[in-house]
Image: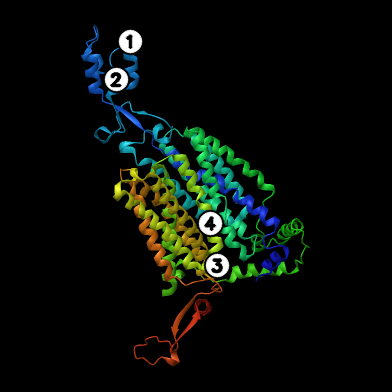
Amino acid sequence: MSEYEQILRQLGSFGPYQRRAFILVSMFETPLAWAMLTPILLNYRPDWYCTDWNILQNGIIAENYTGIDPSLVREIDSNDELQMFLHLVNYTGGNLTSYKTKNTCPGGKICPGIEFEGVKSIVSTWKLVCDQEIVGDIITSIQMAGVLIGAVITGQLADLFGRRHILFIEHAILVIMWFCSAFASSWMVYAGLRFIIGALIGGVLVVNFVLPLELVTPEWRTFCGCIGLWAVGLMALAGWGYFIQDWQYLVICTSTASMFILLSWWFVPESPRWLLSRGRVKKAERILTNMAKYNNKPVPDFSKLRQYSENEMQMKQHQIKYSYWHLCSSWKLAKNSLILLYGWFVSSAVYYGMNFNTKNLTGNLYLNIFFSGLVEIPALFFVVLVHNKFGRRLTVSLLMNVAGVFSFAILILDLAGGLDEYPKLTIVFAMIGKAGISGGWAALQVFSAEIFPTVVRNIGVGACSFCARIGAIVAPQIVYLGAKNAAPLPFTVFGIVAVIAGGLVWLLPETRGVPLPDELTITVPHPSEISEPDGELTENNAETIPLKTIDAEDQNTDNKTEVA
């Protein structure tokens, strides 16, 4: 145990000071959920109507109004021209609405004079239907690509400039760009702004996850890593959408409400662990002193902190530089890495896919969004309660299979008579599947951190996070498949990949109660004990040594060569 963790235990592993910081930092998740998941509402496709102008023109001419030139009637090809014409001639003929068709695309194209009914979304604003139907989901994928880029960049920025500053600066910029997106002049401009918004969301999420973990002792990291206010934000989004059904006003209101969290600047501390890693011991001591006073604990002796800080800085200077190829330095680690990469990809694709697919479910859209957030809460508490009792593999596999089986069951409902015949059961199955993937992903994140050896843990989790972002980019395109009169198709895809992930988990080693691996190891032949002519490894002629020993020897050899 490090000196820093010993001091945290003296001050309270999860005392009032840490709880306050955890709650305040978690509050960022609520507006982040709004920003990330508003495409559920913004991309909603309301009903639209097309007018068959040829038939309508023939109908007006057939009325045989005296003085009406048929050539003028033939020029009517928009609603504005039609209304002007009817006003000029004081038309009192038949009902012209009979010439309108609902949700049709003549020739696969957007018809002239298209009219939308009900909710005002980006679909109705920029006529994203028919041959433009996929644009809304492409914009969402562009946003999720921004999340990927933002997470990668912010990880470096937070290591250089600190967690607290980056958290608040990026959230402030997010609010501004989010607000500006309400005034986009075209969907192309809007897509560019959503990319920037996505990058800022991804950045804030990285710091939002790391900062609380660096304020508590290891036994509280599972709780802080799993429990948050993201689900609360998703539930609140349903209320925003219900009361504000114009996408521009919705964006303005949610972005404006998100700026008030910036007032927590004076109550959220910088990470003492980060300060110590940068040699800023006095600043770390001031924060820890404030923590002691707030927790009603005696101020501990900080004499060993400076030595701890110096050791941390020296280790960074002399430590071996590990890279992504080290994740494949042995067959065992390569197998574990590939399974975890796939698990994160599936978790993200299914989680965000189910969120974005909410708009395609039967029933009330706003209630579906609310329940979609509500089911996450018991799932996350379930993980916290059983993760240590059931073990990592069983917990992850159980929840992944719940997500997969109930998602795939929606296809069974469709084959049994159609989803319209079982609307309530469809929603119940979808929500159980959503709960399963929410808990499964949370459990998998803890499991992954325990499997990767310490020296490549950040690299391993970073690679997993990268795959998760790829899954999030793919998710809207899977959802698009369900919009083409194939509602069960996205759930079928989600079900298959989730069940496969739940099965592959059993090929990973159980980590419950097992000390975390610190070093990379490889198996090499022992020269004095190789008896086989072809040099085949056996249990009796092989030994396991730390990979860093080999790397260090290679580095020394290189240095000697340079000196020579």
Within 10 Å of disc 3 (Cα), the crowding (few <14, some 14-19, many 20+) is few
Sequence-first tag of 3 and 4:
4
Going by the numbered disc 2, the residue's amino acid type is Leu
Sequence-first tag of 4 and 2:
2
Q: Please name whichever residue, 533 or 477, is drawn nearer the observer in this view of the structure.
A: 477
Going by the numbered disc 4, the residue's amino acid type is Leu
Going by the numbered disc 3, the residue's amino acid type is Asn
Q: Quadrant of residue 9?
A: bottom right
Q: Considering the numbered disc 3 on the image, is that residue within a helix, a strand or a loop?
A: helix
Q: Considering the numbered disc 1 on the image, is that residue within a helix, a strand or a loop?
A: helix
- How many angstroms separate mark 3 from mark 1 (CA)? 78 Å
Residue visible at 59% across and 43% down in the picture: 172
Spot the residue most to the right. 298
* Residue ID for mark 4: 380
Residue visible at 48% across and 55% down in the picture: 438
Indicate which label's residue lies in the foreground, 1 or 4.
Answer: 4
Horizontal side, residue 110 vs residue 516: left or right = left
Residue 96 has which mark? 2
- How many angstroms separate mark 1 from mark 2 (CA)? 16 Å
Up-down: is 59 above or below 368? above
- Note whether residue 141 is visible: no
* Residue ID for mark 3: 388
- How many angstroms separate mark 3 from mark 4 (CA)? 14 Å
Sequence-first tag of 1 and 4:
1
